[in-house]
Protein backbone atom coordinates (compact mmCIF):
# COMPACT_ATOMS: atom_id res chain seq x y z
CA UNK A 1 0.00 0.00 0.00
CA UNK A 2 1.56 3.30 -1.11
CA UNK A 3 0.13 6.54 0.24
CA UNK A 4 -0.15 9.50 -2.12
CA UNK A 5 1.53 12.84 -1.34
CA UNK A 6 -1.60 14.97 -1.05
CA UNK A 7 -4.81 14.60 0.93
CA UNK A 8 -7.91 16.72 0.46
CA UNK A 9 -8.76 18.01 3.93
CA UNK A 10 -11.58 20.46 4.72
CA UNK A 11 -11.51 22.10 1.33
CA UNK A 12 -7.82 22.14 0.44
CA UNK A 13 -5.06 19.82 -0.64
CA UNK A 14 -2.51 19.34 2.11
CA UNK A 15 0.69 17.33 2.31
CA UNK A 16 0.24 13.81 3.67
CA UNK A 17 2.19 14.60 6.86
CA UNK A 18 0.14 17.74 7.53
CA UNK A 19 -3.29 16.08 7.48
CA UNK A 20 -3.64 16.01 11.29
CA UNK A 21 -6.46 16.05 13.85
CA UNK A 22 -6.65 16.97 17.55
CA UNK A 23 -6.63 14.17 20.15
CA UNK A 24 -10.03 15.41 21.36
CA UNK A 25 -11.57 14.73 17.96
CA UNK A 26 -15.05 13.47 18.83
CA UNK A 27 -14.88 10.64 16.28
CA UNK A 28 -11.73 9.24 17.94
CA UNK A 29 -13.60 8.83 21.21
CA UNK A 30 -17.06 7.79 20.08
CA UNK A 31 -16.78 6.52 16.50
CA UNK A 32 -18.82 9.40 15.12
CA UNK A 33 -17.67 9.23 11.53
CA UNK A 34 -18.95 7.88 8.24
CA UNK A 35 -16.89 6.90 5.26
CA UNK A 36 -16.69 5.28 1.88
CA UNK A 37 -14.37 2.89 0.13
CA UNK A 38 -14.20 3.70 -3.55
CA UNK A 39 -11.84 2.71 -6.35
CA UNK A 40 -10.59 4.38 -9.50
CA UNK A 41 -9.32 2.17 -12.31
CA UNK A 42 -6.94 2.80 -15.15
CA UNK A 43 -8.92 2.77 -18.38
CA UNK A 44 -8.05 3.56 -21.99
CA UNK A 45 -9.36 7.11 -21.29
CA UNK A 46 -7.38 7.64 -18.10
CA UNK A 47 -8.45 6.97 -14.50
CA UNK A 48 -12.17 6.53 -13.87
CA UNK A 49 -14.04 6.16 -10.57
CA UNK A 50 -16.31 3.12 -10.33
CA UNK A 51 -19.93 3.98 -9.45
CA UNK A 52 -18.78 7.27 -8.01
CA UNK A 53 -22.18 8.88 -7.60
CA UNK A 54 -23.56 5.80 -5.84
CA UNK A 55 -20.72 6.00 -3.30
CA UNK A 56 -21.31 9.73 -2.79
CA UNK A 57 -25.03 9.13 -2.29
CA UNK A 58 -24.30 6.45 0.32
CA UNK A 59 -21.82 8.74 2.08
CA UNK A 60 -24.41 11.49 2.38
CA UNK A 61 -27.08 9.03 3.52
CA UNK A 62 -24.78 7.56 6.19
CA UNK A 63 -23.94 11.10 7.38
CA UNK A 64 -27.59 12.09 7.59
CA UNK A 65 -28.46 8.95 9.56
CA UNK A 66 -25.89 9.97 12.19
CA UNK A 67 -27.03 13.62 12.18
CA UNK A 68 -24.02 15.01 10.33
CA UNK A 69 -24.51 17.73 7.79
CA UNK A 70 -21.67 17.58 5.27
CA UNK A 71 -20.48 21.17 4.66
CA UNK A 72 -19.99 20.49 0.93
CA UNK A 73 -22.38 19.56 -1.86
CA UNK A 74 -22.26 16.19 -3.61
CA UNK A 75 -20.87 17.96 -6.69
CA UNK A 76 -18.08 19.48 -4.56
CA UNK A 77 -17.16 16.09 -3.08
CA UNK A 78 -17.08 14.58 -6.57
CA UNK A 79 -14.86 17.41 -7.88
CA UNK A 80 -12.59 17.16 -4.82
CA UNK A 81 -12.17 13.43 -5.42
CA UNK A 82 -11.26 14.05 -9.05
CA UNK A 83 -8.79 16.70 -7.92
CA UNK A 84 -7.02 14.54 -5.34
CA UNK A 85 -6.66 11.68 -7.85
CA UNK A 86 -5.39 13.95 -10.64
CA UNK A 87 -3.07 16.07 -8.49
CA UNK A 88 -1.45 12.95 -7.04
CA UNK A 89 -0.99 11.60 -10.55
CA UNK A 90 -2.79 8.36 -9.68
CA UNK A 91 -3.62 6.03 -12.56
CA UNK A 92 -5.63 3.73 -10.35
CA UNK A 93 -6.21 3.94 -6.62
CA UNK A 94 -8.35 3.21 -3.60
CA UNK A 95 -10.23 6.31 -2.43
CA UNK A 96 -11.23 6.95 1.18
CA UNK A 97 -13.62 9.82 1.84
CA UNK A 98 -14.17 10.28 5.60
CA UNK A 99 -16.67 12.60 7.27
CA UNK A 100 -16.21 12.93 11.01
CA UNK A 101 -17.05 14.95 14.09
CA UNK A 102 -14.02 17.02 14.99
CA UNK A 103 -12.86 18.46 18.33
CA UNK A 104 -15.58 20.26 20.27
CA UNK A 105 -17.67 19.73 23.37
CA UNK A 106 -17.00 16.28 24.83
CA UNK A 107 -19.82 13.97 25.76
CA UNK A 108 -22.15 11.87 23.73
CA UNK A 109 -24.23 14.67 22.27
CA UNK A 110 -22.23 15.32 19.08
CA UNK A 111 -24.28 17.98 17.36
CA UNK A 112 -22.13 20.94 18.42
CA UNK A 113 -18.86 19.41 17.18
CA UNK A 114 -17.74 20.49 13.71
CA UNK A 115 -18.16 18.14 10.78
CA UNK A 116 -14.84 17.66 8.99
CA UNK A 117 -14.13 15.97 5.68
CA UNK A 118 -11.05 14.40 4.17
CA UNK A 119 -10.44 12.40 1.02
CA UNK A 120 -7.30 10.28 0.82
CA UNK A 121 -6.10 8.05 -2.00
CA UNK A 122 -3.55 5.28 -2.11
CA UNK A 123 -2.39 2.46 -4.31
CA UNK A 124 -3.94 -0.75 -3.05
CA UNK A 125 -4.03 -4.14 -4.67
CA UNK A 126 -6.97 -6.47 -4.18
CA UNK A 127 -7.74 -6.68 -0.43
CA UNK A 128 -7.77 -10.49 -0.27
CA UNK A 129 -4.89 -10.80 -2.73
CA UNK A 130 -4.57 -11.63 -6.41
CA UNK A 131 -4.14 -15.26 -5.51
CA UNK A 132 -7.43 -15.10 -3.57
CA UNK A 133 -9.19 -13.49 -6.50
CA UNK A 134 -7.89 -16.13 -8.87
CA UNK A 135 -8.23 -19.29 -6.77
CA UNK A 136 -10.53 -18.37 -3.90
CA UNK A 137 -10.00 -17.81 -0.18
CA UNK A 138 -10.66 -19.85 2.96
CA UNK A 139 -13.38 -18.40 5.16
CA UNK A 140 -14.80 -19.21 8.57
CA UNK A 141 -18.18 -18.43 10.07
CA UNK A 142 -17.47 -15.99 12.88
CA UNK A 143 -18.56 -16.37 16.48
CA UNK A 144 -19.40 -12.66 16.29
CA UNK A 145 -22.85 -11.72 14.96
CA UNK A 146 -23.29 -8.75 12.64
CA UNK A 147 -24.65 -5.64 14.40
CA UNK A 148 -28.44 -5.71 14.54
CA UNK A 149 -31.02 -3.16 13.42
CA UNK A 150 -32.03 -2.54 17.02
CA UNK A 151 -28.54 -1.50 18.15
CA UNK A 152 -27.08 0.41 15.19
CA UNK A 153 -27.89 1.05 11.54
CA UNK A 154 -26.31 -1.80 9.53
CA UNK A 155 -27.04 -0.04 6.23
CA UNK A 156 -24.93 2.98 7.28
CA UNK A 157 -21.18 2.92 6.70
CA UNK A 158 -20.12 4.42 10.01
CA UNK A 159 -16.66 4.20 11.55
CA UNK A 160 -17.76 3.04 15.02
CA UNK A 161 -19.72 0.17 13.52
CA UNK A 162 -16.52 -1.35 12.17
CA UNK A 163 -15.42 -2.61 15.59
CA UNK A 164 -17.82 -5.44 14.78
CA UNK A 165 -15.90 -6.25 11.57
CA UNK A 166 -12.55 -5.85 13.37
CA UNK A 167 -13.48 -8.52 15.95
CA UNK A 168 -14.57 -10.95 13.24
CA UNK A 169 -11.53 -10.25 11.04
CA UNK A 170 -9.01 -10.76 13.83
CA UNK A 171 -10.77 -13.93 14.96
CA UNK A 172 -10.69 -15.34 11.41
CA UNK A 173 -7.04 -14.46 10.77
CA UNK A 174 -5.84 -15.75 14.14
CA UNK A 175 -7.56 -19.03 13.35
CA UNK A 176 -5.72 -19.21 10.00
CA UNK A 177 -8.50 -18.14 7.62
CA UNK A 178 -8.51 -15.25 5.20
CA UNK A 179 -11.99 -13.96 5.94
CA UNK A 180 -14.78 -14.22 8.53
CA UNK A 181 -18.45 -14.59 7.62
CA UNK A 182 -20.88 -12.99 10.05
CA UNK A 183 -24.37 -14.30 10.72
CA UNK A 184 -27.16 -11.86 11.53
CA UNK A 185 -28.96 -11.63 14.85
CA UNK A 186 -31.33 -14.44 13.79
CA UNK A 187 -28.46 -16.76 12.84
CA UNK A 188 -28.98 -16.31 9.08
CA UNK A 189 -26.01 -15.60 6.81
CA UNK A 190 -25.17 -11.89 6.55
CA UNK A 191 -21.82 -10.98 4.95
CA UNK A 192 -18.04 -10.92 5.23
CA UNK A 193 -16.22 -8.37 7.40
CA UNK A 194 -16.00 -6.01 4.40
CA UNK A 195 -17.82 -7.83 1.60
CA UNK A 196 -21.28 -9.00 0.63
CA UNK A 197 -21.86 -12.68 -0.02
CA UNK A 198 -23.34 -14.68 -2.90
CA UNK A 199 -24.24 -18.38 -2.74
CA UNK A 200 -24.86 -20.44 -5.89
CA UNK A 201 -26.66 -23.76 -6.00
CA UNK A 202 -28.14 -25.58 -8.98
CA UNK A 203 -27.47 -22.58 -11.20
CA UNK A 204 -29.37 -20.07 -9.01
CA UNK A 205 -27.53 -17.16 -7.40
CA UNK A 206 -28.76 -15.99 -3.98
CA UNK A 207 -27.62 -13.16 -1.73
CA UNK A 208 -28.92 -11.96 1.66
CA UNK A 209 -31.09 -8.82 1.68
CA UNK A 210 -31.51 -5.91 4.09
CA UNK A 211 -33.47 -8.03 6.58
CA UNK A 212 -30.17 -9.84 7.21
CA UNK A 213 -28.47 -6.62 8.45
CA UNK A 214 -26.26 -6.23 5.38
CA UNK A 215 -24.47 -3.11 4.30
CA UNK A 216 -26.03 -2.41 0.91
CA UNK A 217 -22.90 -2.95 -1.14
CA UNK A 218 -22.50 -1.10 -4.40
CA UNK A 219 -20.55 -3.99 -5.91
CA UNK A 220 -23.32 -6.28 -4.68
CA UNK A 221 -25.71 -4.32 -6.90
CA UNK A 222 -23.29 -4.65 -9.81
CA UNK A 223 -22.99 -8.43 -9.33
CA UNK A 224 -26.78 -8.77 -9.13
CA UNK A 225 -27.15 -6.76 -12.34
CA UNK A 226 -24.44 -8.71 -14.14
CA UNK A 227 -25.87 -12.05 -13.00
CA UNK A 228 -29.31 -11.12 -14.30
CA UNK A 229 -27.92 -9.73 -17.55
CA UNK A 230 -26.11 -13.06 -18.07
CA UNK A 231 -29.48 -14.79 -17.76
CA UNK A 232 -29.11 -16.26 -14.28
CA UNK A 233 -31.84 -16.23 -11.69
CA UNK A 234 -30.63 -13.95 -8.87
CA UNK A 235 -32.58 -14.01 -5.62
CA UNK A 236 -32.31 -11.70 -2.60
CA UNK A 237 -33.39 -13.93 0.25
CA UNK A 238 -32.52 -15.28 3.67
CA UNK A 239 -29.70 -17.83 3.54
CA UNK A 240 -29.32 -20.44 6.29
CA UNK A 241 -25.81 -21.24 7.53
CA UNK A 242 -26.20 -24.82 6.34
CA UNK A 243 -26.61 -23.61 2.77
CA UNK A 244 -23.00 -22.47 2.82
CA UNK A 245 -21.95 -26.12 3.12
CA UNK A 246 -24.32 -27.25 0.35
CA UNK A 247 -23.35 -24.49 -2.09
CA UNK A 248 -21.78 -25.28 -5.46
CA UNK A 249 -20.07 -21.89 -5.45
CA UNK A 250 -19.71 -18.90 -3.11
CA UNK A 251 -18.23 -15.51 -3.86
CA UNK A 252 -17.93 -12.16 -2.14
CA UNK A 253 -18.07 -8.63 -3.52
CA UNK A 254 -16.72 -5.37 -2.14
CA UNK A 255 -14.78 -2.34 -3.27
CA UNK A 256 -11.63 -3.50 -1.51
CA UNK A 257 -11.90 -7.24 -2.32
CA UNK A 258 -13.59 -6.72 -5.73
CA UNK A 259 -15.05 -10.14 -6.65
CA UNK A 260 -13.31 -12.86 -4.67
CA UNK A 261 -14.42 -16.51 -4.68
CA UNK A 262 -14.54 -18.60 -1.48
CA UNK A 263 -13.01 -22.03 -1.99
CA UNK A 264 -13.40 -23.39 1.51
CA UNK A 265 -15.84 -22.60 4.30
CA UNK A 266 -15.33 -23.90 7.84
CA UNK A 267 -12.79 -26.39 6.42
CA UNK A 268 -15.29 -27.84 3.92
CA UNK A 269 -14.54 -27.38 0.22
CA UNK A 270 -17.06 -25.23 -1.59
CA UNK A 271 -18.20 -27.33 -4.58
CA UNK A 272 -15.09 -28.80 -6.17
CA UNK A 273 -12.86 -26.63 -3.98
CA UNK A 274 -12.09 -24.37 -6.93
CA UNK A 275 -13.98 -21.29 -8.13
CA UNK A 276 -16.96 -22.50 -10.18
CA UNK A 277 -18.16 -21.66 -13.67
CA UNK A 278 -20.82 -19.08 -12.73
CA UNK A 279 -18.43 -17.27 -10.40
CA UNK A 280 -15.86 -17.13 -13.19
CA UNK A 281 -18.30 -15.74 -15.75
CA UNK A 282 -19.69 -13.08 -13.40
CA UNK A 283 -16.15 -12.20 -12.27
CA UNK A 284 -14.97 -11.76 -15.87
CA UNK A 285 -17.84 -9.39 -16.70
CA UNK A 286 -17.30 -7.54 -13.45
CA UNK A 287 -13.58 -7.07 -14.09
CA UNK A 288 -14.35 -5.81 -17.59
CA UNK A 289 -16.81 -3.29 -16.11
CA UNK A 290 -14.28 -2.09 -13.52
CA UNK A 291 -11.52 -1.58 -16.07
CA UNK A 292 -13.64 0.14 -18.71
CA UNK A 293 -13.60 -2.80 -21.12
CA UNK A 294 -17.38 -3.19 -21.11
CA UNK A 295 -19.62 -0.99 -23.25
CA UNK A 296 -22.69 -2.30 -21.51
CA UNK A 297 -21.58 -0.98 -18.13
CA UNK A 298 -19.63 2.06 -19.33
CA UNK A 299 -21.95 4.38 -17.42
CA UNK A 300 -20.69 2.90 -14.13
CA UNK A 301 -17.38 4.72 -14.63
CA UNK A 302 -16.86 8.39 -13.84
CA UNK A 303 -13.78 9.56 -15.78
CA UNK A 304 -11.36 11.81 -13.89
CA UNK A 305 -10.82 15.04 -15.87
CA UNK A 306 -7.19 15.95 -16.53
CA UNK A 307 -5.96 18.58 -14.04
CA UNK A 308 -6.07 22.18 -15.23
CA UNK A 309 -2.63 23.33 -16.44
CA UNK A 310 -0.72 25.39 -13.89
CA UNK A 311 -1.17 29.17 -14.51
C1 LIG B 1 -19.33 -4.52 6.10
C2 LIG B 1 -19.28 -4.38 4.62
N1 LIG B 1 -20.15 -5.06 3.86
C3 LIG B 1 -20.16 -4.97 2.52
C4 LIG B 1 -19.25 -4.16 1.85
C5 LIG B 1 -19.28 -4.05 0.37
O1 LIG B 1 -19.74 -2.78 -0.02
P1 LIG B 1 -19.26 -2.13 -1.40
O2 LIG B 1 -19.54 -3.12 -2.47
O3 LIG B 1 -20.12 -0.92 -1.54
O4 LIG B 1 -17.83 -1.82 -1.27
C6 LIG B 1 -18.33 -3.42 2.61
C7 LIG B 1 -17.36 -2.53 1.94
O5 LIG B 1 -17.60 -1.36 1.82
C8 LIG B 1 -18.35 -3.52 4.00
O6 LIG B 1 -17.47 -2.83 4.74
Image (cartoon, helix red, strand yellow):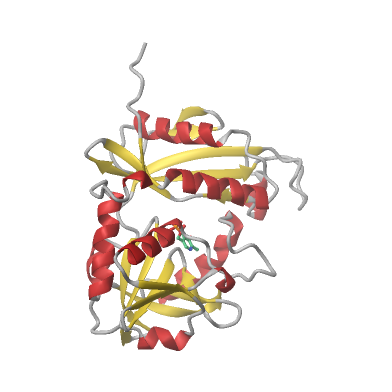
Q: Quadrant of residue 129?
A: bottom left
Residue 197 can be seen, yes or no = yes
Label tally:
0
Query: Can you give x and y, in whole percent of width and height, for residue 172 in the image?
Result: 42, 75
The relative height of residue 139 versus residue 90 in the rendered view (above or below) is below
Q: Which residue is more in the foreground, 70 or 29? A: 70
Q: Is residue 69 left or right of residue 44?
A: right
Query: Can you give x and y, in whole percent of width and height, for residue 221 in the image?
Result: 43, 60
Q: Which residue is more in the foreground, 39 or 218? A: 218
Q: Who's the residue at 32% across and 27% down the image?
A: 306
Q: Which residue is more in the foreground, 185 or 210? A: 210
Q: Which residue is more in the foreground, 148 or 281? A: 281
Residue 21 can be seen, yes or no = no
Q: Which quadrant holds the C terminus?
A: top left
Q: Who's the residue at 47% across and 43% down the image?
A: 53
Q: Who's the residue at 53% across and 81% down the image?
A: 188
Q: Is residue 273 left or right of residue 204?
A: left
The relative height of residue 227 versus residue 311 in the rendered view (above or below) is below
Query: Can you give x and y, in whole percent of width and height, for residue 182 in the image?
Result: 50, 75
The furthest residue to the top: 311
The relative height of residue 77 versus residue 126 in the rendered view (above or below) is above
Query: Can you give x and y, in whole percent of width and height, for residue 286 in the image?
Result: 30, 58
Q: Is residue 246 left or right of residue 216?
A: left
Amino acid sequence: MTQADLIWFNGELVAHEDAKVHVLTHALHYGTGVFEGVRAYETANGPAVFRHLDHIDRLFKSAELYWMEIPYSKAEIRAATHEVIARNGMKSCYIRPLVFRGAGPMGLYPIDCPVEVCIAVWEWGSYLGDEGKANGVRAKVSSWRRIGHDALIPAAKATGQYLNSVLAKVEAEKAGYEEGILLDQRGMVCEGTGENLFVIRDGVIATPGYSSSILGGINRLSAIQIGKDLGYEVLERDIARGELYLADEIFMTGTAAELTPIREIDDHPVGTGEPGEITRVVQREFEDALHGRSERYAEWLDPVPAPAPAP
